[in-house]
Image (cartoon, helix red, strand yellow):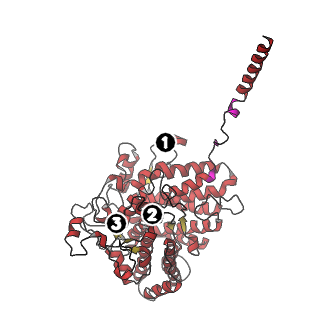
Amino acid sequence: MIRKIAVILCLIGTLGSCTKDFETINVNPNAPSAVPLDYLLAQSTLFITGEGGDPGYRSWRTNIIYAAMMMQHMSSVEVGFYRGTVYTFQGDLSAAWFERAYPNSIKNLVNLIELAKKDPKQVNILSMARILRVIEIGVLTDVYGDVPYSEAGYGALTGVFSPKYDAQKDIYADMLKELEEAGTALNATAYVPKTADLVFGGDIAKWKRAANSLMLRFAMRLQKVDATSAQAWAKKAVDRGLMTSTDDSFGVKFASTGAGNNSNPNSWNMFPGGRGIVTADNIQWSKTYIEAMKTRKDPRLSVVSALKSGDIDPTKQVGLPIGTDATMLAALPAPLNARANYSRPAPNMYALDNTQFVMTYAESELLKAEAIERTWATGTAKTAYDNAVVAGIKQSNSYGGKLTDAQAMAYLAANPYPATGTLEAKMEAIHTEFWMTTGSLLQHIEAWSNWRRTGYPKLTPVNYPGNETNGQIPRRLRYSQGEYGVNPGIDVAVGRQGADLFTTRMWWDK
C-alpha cells in the first residue's frame, strides 16, 4: 500500500509539472510558430508571376488569352476562348489577374511587409517586398485602372474586407514613392536573404538598379497625362542609376522541371505536361509578328518559333492571321487551312525552369532613349537604343538560344536608330523594338501597356462580328463581376473612371 501511495504521489507531482510547463511541452519543435521571413519572401516572389493552387492560371488568361492576342504577338482560331483575338468578354478570363492577385500575392506581400517592419535587421526583406508589391499592383492598375491599393490585403489586420478602390493617379504617386524609398533603404551591410532572393541571389546593387528602372517605367507611363511629373521621375530614375546589362534584368528564376508553383507559369501553360496549349494547337504566333520578324531580319525567329514538326528554319515560319476563326481557317487553301501548319512557340520557350521576366535591361534602355529624346534625361539616345537592341537579342538566349554578338550587330545594322527625323519617327523606332523584344520574351501585358501609351507599333485591329469595341483594340480589361454587390468601392471607381468596358481609357491613357 505504501508503495502504491508513493507511486500515486509521484504521478500527481509529475502531472503538476506537466501542467506547469504545458505550453512548452506541447510545442512541436519541428513546426515553427512563426514562418521565417526568408520563406515568405521566396513564396511572395513566386506569387507575383503565378499563384498557389493552379500554376499559370492568371498568366494564361491575362498574358496570353488577352494581351498576347490583342498585341498580335499570338493568334488562335479558338476565338470563343482566346477572346483577345476578337475583343469579346468572358468574366473569368478578363478578371483572372484581379481575382487571383488579391487573395494570394497581395495578401502575402502585405503580411510580409508588416512582419518585416517590426525588425530593423530585416530592412532588405522589407525593401524587396515593397518593390514586389509595386510590381504586382503595377500590373493590376495597368490592366484594370482604379483598383484596391491602400487598404488591399489588410483585411486580417484591420478588419476591412471591402477595400476602397484608389484612383490610378494616387496609386502611381505612391508606387513611385515606394520605389524611391525602398531602393534607398536597401543596405548591403544588413542581413541579405541570398537563398530566398529568387531574382538576384542577394545582390543588393542589382535590386537598387532594378528599382530605379521600374521607376523609369512608371514615370514614362505618365507621359500623356502628366508630363511634368513624368519628367521629374524619369530624371530621378536615370540619375539614381539604371540597369547596366542583361545580368541586371529582373526575372524570377525557376528551378523546377516538374509540375507545381516552382514552374515558370508561361511555360506551364504551353508545356505538354501542363496545359499543353502549344501541342494542342491552341495558340500560334500571329502573322503580324512573324512577318515583322522576317522583314526586320530578326535572328530571334529561330529561337522563339517552330513548326509543329519541330522545324525552326526561319524561312519556313508562318504566322496565323489575327481574327481568324475555325470556319475562316477551313476556307483557306491548303496547307493554310490547318492550324498544325502554323508556327507556335518553340519547345525551348516552355521549359519549366525558364526565367520569367518582369523587366529587362533592354526595356530600361529603350525607355532611357525616349527620356533622352524628350530632354528629360542626359545621354545619347542612339547609344541607349543600340544597347537595348543588342541586349534584346542576347536576352532571348535565356530561352535556349545561342545567338551571337555578330547576329545582334547585324540586326542592329538592319534596324538602325534614325539619324535624323521627327520625334515621332524616333518614338516609332524605339517602341517598335520594344514590341519586338517583349513579344520574344512573352511579356505581352507590358507590350500592351506600352502600346496604349505610345501607339506603337501601328497595329491594324480586327472587327470580328459581335466584338465589344466596335473593332478597336481594348484599352483595359473589365473588373471581376464578383465585386459588384460585394464591394461598394467598385461603384465609386466606375463613377470616377468611366463605364466598366474594354473601351474606357484609364487615367494615364486619356
The crowd level at tag 2 (other Cα within 10 Å; few <14, some 14-19, many 20+) is many
Among numbered discs 1 and 3, the one appearing first in the sequence: 1
Q: Nearer the viewer, residue 283 or 179?
A: 283
Which numbered tag is attached to residue 283? 3
Foreground residue among 442 and 398? 398
Q: Amino acid at mark 2?
A: Ser
Residue 242 shows in the view: no
Viewer-nearest residue: 510 or 209:
209
Part of the protein shown in magenta: 21-38
Give x and y (percent) for residue 277. 37, 62
The image quadrant that residue 350 belongs to is bottom left
Residue at (41% x, 51% y) in the render = 99
Q: Is residue 116 visible?
A: yes
Quarter of the image with the N terminus is: top right
Lower sequence index among marks 2 and 1: 1
Q: Amino acid at mark 3?
A: Ile
Residue on which the image places disc 1: 160
* Mark 2 lies on residue: 267
Q: Is residue 368 above or below residue 189?
A: below
SS at badge 1: loop
